[in-house]
Amino acid sequence: MRKRRTIYFNDARHYYLFVFEPPMRMEDAWIPVDEVAGTGIDTFIYGVSRADGLFYPSRVGLEWGSDRKPFQNAYEWRCWENMQSLIAKDLDPLQVLIDRAHEKGMEFFSSLRLGAYGGMNPEHNVAEGGRGFVHTEVRDHQHAIIEELATRYDAEGIELDFAASPGGCPFCLNPDEAPEHASLMTDFVRDASATVRGRPGQPGLLGARVYPTVELNQRAGLDVETWLAKGYVDFVVPMAYSCFVLDAQMPIDWIVKAAHANDISVYGMLQPYYLDGRRPNTKVEHATPQMMRAAASNFWEADVDGLYTWFMDWPLEDGERRTLSFMGDPDLTREGDKHYFLRQRPENEESYVYGAELPVSIPAADPAKSYEVEFSINDDPENDRIRRMILKINVAELVSQDRFEVSLNGTSLSTETCRRTPRWHDAYTGQWLEFDLDGLRPTKGTNKVQFVLHSRPDDFEGEIRVDDVELIIEYGVFPTQKSS
């Protein structure tokens, strides 16, 4: 049955067990839950595993750190000692969080990465050349952990994280043979569903993180459409761990349609970054509340059943808590300042990331050749509460003497005011163009931005490249009057 949820995920490590100094006080042990309490978050999901162990005292799997002593890093020592300091008080670190979430009125789900299994024969691991879930021992081992989490702890359910690969853990199946073994993964999800839902007492719920496109899931041997048709899961979260950049344009229509046809919930993932630091002369930058609101608004328009986020700038402060509050209510995302932006596709086309509109390379001046990108917004340009709309285009290798034309939905922006500003710290490599959209505005829904490089200065034939397309929308409290 579909259910509205607003979800925050904590991975147990970076902003929790790795950072607090042992012995762990209860006030520290409660931090992951307490820092989101009092916002719109009603569901807390906790990552109980990494590739090398489990962050709770498992009886069937490898407890993280038990095979690493003596520790070589401060974070490893802290993690182990923090867990052990709670266990020494007869407290289970996982149950402590479950109890705290329930005390704060939140549901709790344990999230399990499937592609890694500390303590097993390393030759089974796909990263070591093994065949992963093709090995019966691997499937049995992971199923035992699912059963333990479902029956030993009184959480609402379990999230199976298939989308952590690559980057967060190895794949469940060797990519060379994954599609032919999709039925193994379907049977595994079926059996997990039966175990979680059939546990003693209150039936549990089963969710899954999967990839945003059919093609990526198929490459990994994940027949998500069959899982949905058979009703094996209660919710799905389309995302890619290998892309931490917020995407207001994530192509999830297919999974929303398939899930809702079977009364299954879909939660839109608000990834945490604006920039991930991979581009030259950039660093990691978290998405602002305005960026989060823009993406949230688009997700609600796509008919998701709720929103999900994680890994926000930490410690969580006013800006982050503001985002966690408005993301729980679609009415709070419709009006309010927004910052839409398009993400770039990876430089490595073979990487496990779905496509993107940017960058757009224009190899030479050609007035007959037009290039374009598409983006969607969920704002009505006729809304009189909108004060300003600014379209920003970041163009590498652009000079002011270039005749470079930008059009919006087929109409040139040459009559709109355009300001030029330098790029980041490498001003010599290009320019930002900022268009005040007074006479011409985008439409609600899909928009197209076209580019034509008509000519370049004499003795200059290098290419230009559109690296960024962004739209900033500012709202006011009172109506904006247009000049007559």
Image (cartoon, helix red, strand yellow):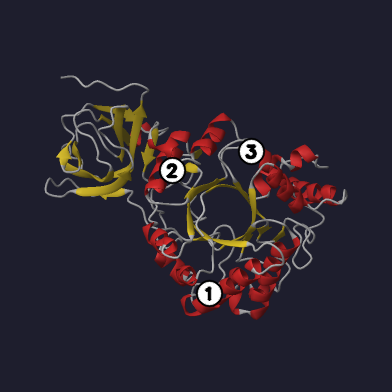
Q: Position of 93 compared to 341: left or right?
A: right
Label 3 residue SS: loop
Instruction: Tell me the quarter of the picture where residue 214 sits.
Output: bottom left
Q: Amino acid at mark 2?
A: Ala
- The answer to whether residue 47 of the structure is visible from this angle is yes
Q: How far is mark 3 from mark 1, CA to CA?
A: 36 Å
Q: Position of residue 13 (x, y in %)?
A: 68, 49
Instruction: Tell me the quarter of the picture where residue 473 sits.
Output: top left
What residue did someone put label 2 on?
A: 296
Q: Nearer the viewer, residue 207 or 127?
A: 207
Q: Nearer the viewer, residue 35 or 200?
A: 200
**Neighbour class for label 2 at 10 Å: few (<14), some, many (≥20)?**
many
Label 1 residue SS: helix
Q: Position of 137 compared to 207: left or right?
A: right
Label 2 residue SS: helix
Q: How far is mark 1 from mark 2, CA to CA?
A: 31 Å
What residue did someone put label 3 on?
A: 37
At 55% across and 59% down in the image, what residue appears? 164
What residue did someone put label 1 on?
A: 186
Instruction: Tell me the quarter of the picture where residue 404 sits.
Output: top left
